[in-house]
């Protein structure tokens, strides 16, 4: 709408920024408070004296670094596998005519709505039988099935927009089919695949219910699960500033990804959900 | 899992040149099914099969601490659950959280979407800001808000004690409604931006010409909102409400971190988790899983019926 920006819009703009960033600023500020300051109680927003001791403590805490390794490993592997399978499926859905296309989309839709917690009881039982309990694959496999629907939607919406005739045009101009695929189709499809990968990564990075149910030690516990067990010596007085530090560290990858790829994430989120 | 690459199969069907259309269609049909097979197998194996397993286990008395005591009990697990006041209390909590958060998110999300639609400057900054709550780990959001509402270390009491209903010594986790408020604050904070992005996408599909025509015809702002903007965004609103409602109904992370179910703030998901993982009651837990699944189905059905929108057509699928 090419109207001039009124004061209401400016106020709204500021409200949105404060809404989104205040809690983030809050945990960052809290992470620089000393443990003794939060133990005695410090109701002010900013630290009385700034310290980086929490970061030193958390990053030398073996349980936390193990959890960080598990989070990265599990999220990245789940993302790669999920995106590969979703790309194959989305290509078929967008370009080929085959029986059962609607069935596939319905299954994906149903799984997107599936209550994850419902799976805790059967998976807990099954994973112990298959020796997948407390292992990386034990989390990677369910993460794949829960991210595939979103990835398939995003990618099939994206693939439908690709001008596939260009592949043939390149072949007419003398390119081999491999060249046509690599030089024409891959660059066009890459942004969509990449967007699906980001959304998948966010899910796996965020997941908590399965992560605390299907793991039992730091050999496979991810950061969100580890944080819920990190209560410190006094359960009624959790180590606020250290938890905030862990929270900041696990948020850094999210912020980096958002800063670099905001446009693609928004396109991916909305293309999969709202069309026509 | 065999993954057939697109190219060989395609080139296999092209050489004869004058293939009959039906042969081509058969080959395309087969290739399409091969390509979707791995994804479908993974999706079904980890959801449908375990769900059937849960259905089966829910008919047994089965506690992991006393496995030799396992025995078929028919539907009695369901009878116990449906006759238990805790189950209904938790269900009520979950429904309250779902209805309140989705309603508030819809209003605030729409306001945010209007602002984002109008703003011409600093769009990158706005997008970045709005995506941070979306991308942030729910457990982190729960901790951030738990600390913000803390008596000793939180800023909420000291910033807002001038409001008549907030005392400087307010213990937000000391009673049911205050604790529910804190949980919903974290939930609303994290998910409103997602809602606003979906609504923004719907808003940008409302024709500007139609809006101008309405304005020329003398429609007030409210009339334009209710007669032009909202009806044209119906599909987007439907998708946003459906996804957020089902998501809110599954609320788990925020409650586990912020109250661990204290002050009667337990949700259905938390109850299921507690039965399985803490009490090791696989039979009872499986029955709860089945009920949770059925509840989600009912909610999805109600929302789709309520808005009378075909999801597939809303997505542009043929």
Image (spheres, coloured by chain):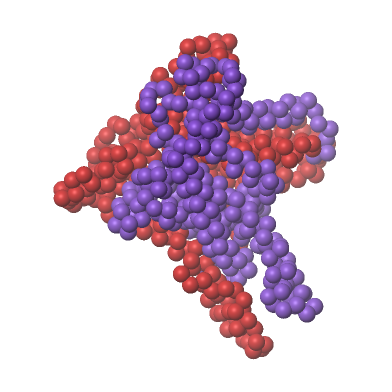
Chain colours: A purple, B red
- Look at the image and tell me whether residue A272 can be seen: no
Residue B198 figure quarter? top right
Q: Which residue shows up at 75% across the image and 70% down it?
A: A166
Q: Which residue shows up at 63% across the image and 32% down it?
A: A20
Q: Quadrant of the N terminus of chain A?
A: top right
Query: Horizontal and vertical percent for residue A50?
Result: 60, 22
Q: Nearer the viewer, residue A162 or A78?
A: A78
- Look at the image and tell me whether residue A241 can be seen: yes
Residue B208 in the figure: left or right of residue A52: right
Q: Nearer the viewer, residue A135 or B65?
A: A135
Q: Up-down: is A150 above or below A253?
A: below
Q: Nearer the viewer, residue B40 or A206?
A: A206
Q: Nearer the viewer, residue B90 or B20?
A: B90
Residue A272 in the figure: left or right of residue B144: right
Q: Which residue shows up at 39% across the image and 53% down it?
A: A135
Query: Horizontal and vertical percent for residue A81?
Result: 52, 60
Q: Up-down: is B29 above or below B294?
A: below
Query: Horizontal and vertical percent for residue A188?
Result: 71, 62
């Amino acid at each position: 709408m090419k109207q001039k920006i009124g004061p209401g819009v400016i106020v709204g703009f500021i409200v949105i920024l404060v809404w989104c960033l205040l809690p983030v600023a809050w945990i960052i500020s809290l992470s620089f408070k000393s443990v003794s300051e939060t133990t005695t109680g410090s109701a002010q927003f900013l630290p009385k004296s700034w310290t980086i001791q929490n970061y030193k403590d958390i990053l030398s805490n073996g349980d936390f670094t193990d959890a960080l390794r598990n989070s990265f490993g599990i999220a990245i592997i789940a993302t790669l596998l999920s995106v590969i399978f979703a790309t194959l499926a989305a290509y078929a859905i967008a370009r080929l005519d085959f029986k059962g296309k609607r069935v596939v989309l319905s299954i994906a839709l149903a799984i997107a709505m599936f209550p994850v917690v419902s799976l805790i009881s059967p998976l807990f039982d099954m994973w112990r039988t298959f020796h997948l309990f407390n292992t990386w694959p034990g989390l990677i496999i369910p993460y794949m099935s829960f991210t595939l629907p979103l990835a398939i939607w995003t990618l099939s919406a994206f693939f439908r927009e690709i001008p596939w005739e260009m592949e043939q045009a390149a072949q007419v101009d003398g390119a081999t089919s491999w060249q046509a695929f690599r030089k024409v189709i891959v660059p066009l499809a890459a942004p969509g695949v990449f967007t699906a990968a980001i959304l998948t990564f966010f899910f796996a990075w965020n997941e908590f219910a399965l992560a605390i149910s299907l793991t039992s030690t730091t050999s496979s516990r991810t950061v969100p699960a580890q944080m819920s067990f990190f209560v410190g010596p006094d359960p009624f007085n959790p180590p606020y500033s250290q938890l905030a530090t862990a929270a900041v560290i696990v948020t850094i990858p999210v912020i980096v990804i958002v800063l670099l790829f905001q446009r693609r994430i928004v396109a991916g989120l909305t293309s999969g959900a709202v069309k026509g | 899992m065999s993954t057939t690459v697109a190219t060989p199969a395609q080139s296999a069907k092209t050489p004869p040149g004058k293939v009959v259309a039906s042969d081509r269609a058969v080959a395309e049909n087969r290739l399409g099914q091969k390509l979707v097979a791995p994804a479908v197998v993974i999706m079904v194996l980890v959801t449908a099969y375990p769900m059937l397993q849960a259905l089966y286990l829910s008919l047994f008395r089965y506690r992991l601490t006393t496995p030799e005591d396992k025995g078929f009990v028919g539907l009695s697990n369901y009878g116990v659950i449906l006759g238990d006041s805790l189950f209904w209390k938790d269900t009520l909590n979950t429904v309250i959280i779902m209805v309140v958060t989705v309603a508030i998110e819809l209003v605030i999300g729409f306001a945010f979407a209007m602002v984002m639609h109008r703003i011409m400057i600093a769009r990158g900054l706005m997008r970045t800001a709005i995506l941070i709550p979306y991308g942030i780990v729910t457990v982190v959001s729960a901790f951030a808000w738990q600390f913000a509402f803390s008596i000793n270390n939180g800023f909420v009491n000291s910033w807002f004690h001038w409001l008549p209903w907030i005392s400087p010594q307010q213990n937000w986790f000391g009673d049911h409604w205050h604790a529910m408020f804190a949980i919903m604050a974290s939930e609303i904070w994290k998910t409103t931006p997602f809602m606003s992005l979906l609504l923004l996408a719907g808003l940008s599909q409302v024709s500007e010409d139609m809006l101008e025509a309405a304005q020329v015809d003398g429609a007030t702002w409210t009339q334009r909102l209710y007669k032009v903007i909202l009806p044209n965004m119906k599909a987007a609103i439907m998708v946003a409400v459906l996804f957020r409602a089902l998501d809110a109904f599954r609320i788990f992370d925020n409650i586990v971190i912020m109250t661990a179910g204290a002050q009667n703030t337990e949700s259905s998901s938390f109850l299921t988790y507690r039965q399985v993982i803490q009490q090791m009651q696989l039979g009872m837990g499986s029955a709860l899983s089945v009920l949770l699944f059925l509840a989600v189905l009912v909610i999805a059905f109600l929302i789709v019926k309520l808005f009378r929108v075909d999801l597939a057509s809303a997505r542009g699928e043929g």
